[in-house]
Amino acid sequence: MDEIKTTSGRAVGSWNGEQAQDLMAELKRIKGMLASERATDMLDSRTMPHREQLHPDLLEFRAYHLWGCDKQGQCVVGTNANRIESVDKVLSFSLIDHH
């Protein structure tokens, strides 16, 4: 399932899990759309499609927003979903025990 849904369950976009850059662009588009609608609905990074692609150690990661990781191990991170980091970098941060 590729659907990106808001906290109320409304489907507002999609991501196929292939490229982190595509997820970052789609999240930017969705956030802009929600802002223009003045929607009270939000996105939850923990409900993004393709959670199964996350490294098992990152499923409960809470140090900062982790929106998703693509098949090449690149992850979209940050409150505004505006950075891409390698899964290794996120894991090394995770091991410092911030969750």
Image (cartoon, rainbow, N blue to C red):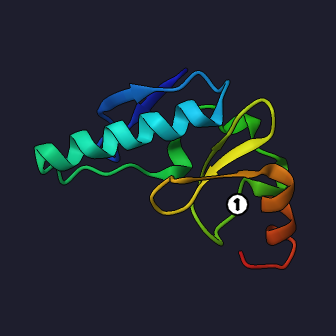
Q: Residue at x 66, y 39 (%)?
A: 51
Q: Quadrant of residue 11?
A: top left
Residue 93: percent from left, percent from top: 80, 70
Q: Quadrant of the C terminus?
A: bottom right
Report the residue marked by disc 1.
60
Q: Residue at x 81, y 79 (%)?
A: 97
Q: Quadrant of residue 60?
A: bottom right
Residue 70: percent from left, percent from top: 71, 34
Q: Quadrant of the N terminus?
A: top right
The answer to which of 46 and 35 lies nearer the viewer is: 35
The answer to which of 80 and 49 lies nearer the viewer is: 80
* Amino acid type, mark 1: Glu
Q: Quadrant of residue 96?
A: bottom right
Q: Residue at x 65, y 29 (%)?
A: 19
Q: Residue at x 31, y 51 (%)?
A: 42
Tell me the SS state at disc 1. loop
Residue 83: percent from left, percent from top: 59, 54
